[in-house]
């Protein structure tokens, strides 16, 4: 249950960030509700995850790393943002680091 809530927090944050990009500096106002609600939901869900006992270091590492990776990949798909080889390697290192952090807590 805790991991599902964390995934919800990640999805909400990624949605908000992609909506922020789509808003073009808030010029496209129709994206503002998704931005506000996405970030609010993300922080509320992250707070619930922490209240349920997940260690903050693990929760934040997973939330940040998967959020960065998902945002980069979806930014590429939705907005044709460039992902260089170096960027892809960096994303892999970030995700790999989170896996190691999680494995180290078991």
Image: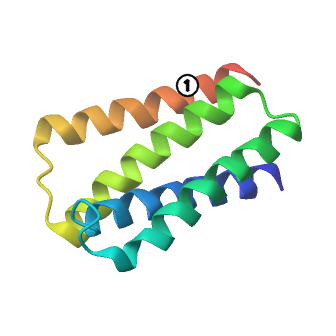
Q: Nearer the viewer, residue 65 or 22?
A: 22
Question: Which residue is tagged 1?
Answer: 100
State the residue lying farthest toward the bottom.
Answer: 30
Quick check: 85 left or right of 76?
A: left
Quick check: 45 left or right of 26?
A: right
How many numbered discs, if any? 1
Identify which residue is drawn at 65% across, 47% down.
43
Q: Secondary structure at mark 1?
A: helix
Identify which residue is drawn at 28% across, 68% down.
23
Mark 1: give few (<14), some (14-19) or many (20+) Cα within 10 Å.
Answer: few
Q: x, y (%) of residue 59?
A: 67, 35
Quick check: 72 left or right of 81?
A: right
Identify which residue is drawn at 65% across, 59% down.
41
Question: Residue 38's image quarter?
Answer: bottom right
Q: Nearer the viewer, residue 86 or 56?
A: 56
Q: Identify the image quadrant of the C terminus.
A: top right
Relative to 79, say whether 89 is above or below: above
Q: Identify the image quadrant of the N terminus.
A: bottom right
Q: x, y (%) of residue 100?
A: 55, 25
Identify which residue is drawn at 13% across, 66% down.
80
């Amino acid at each position: 249950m805790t991991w599902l809530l964390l995934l919800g927090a990640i999805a909400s944050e990624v949605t908000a960030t992609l909506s922020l990009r789509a808003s073009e500096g808030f010029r496209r106002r129709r994206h503002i509700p998704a931005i506000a609600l996405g970030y609010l939901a993300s922080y509320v869900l992250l707070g619930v995850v922490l209240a349920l006992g997940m260690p903050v270091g693990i929760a934040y590492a997973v939330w940040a790393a998967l959020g960065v990776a998902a945002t980069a990949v979806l930014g590429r798909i939705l907005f044709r943002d460039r992902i260089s080889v170096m960027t892809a390697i960096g994303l892999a290192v970030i995700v790999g680091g989170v896996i190691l952090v999680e494995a180290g807590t078991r």
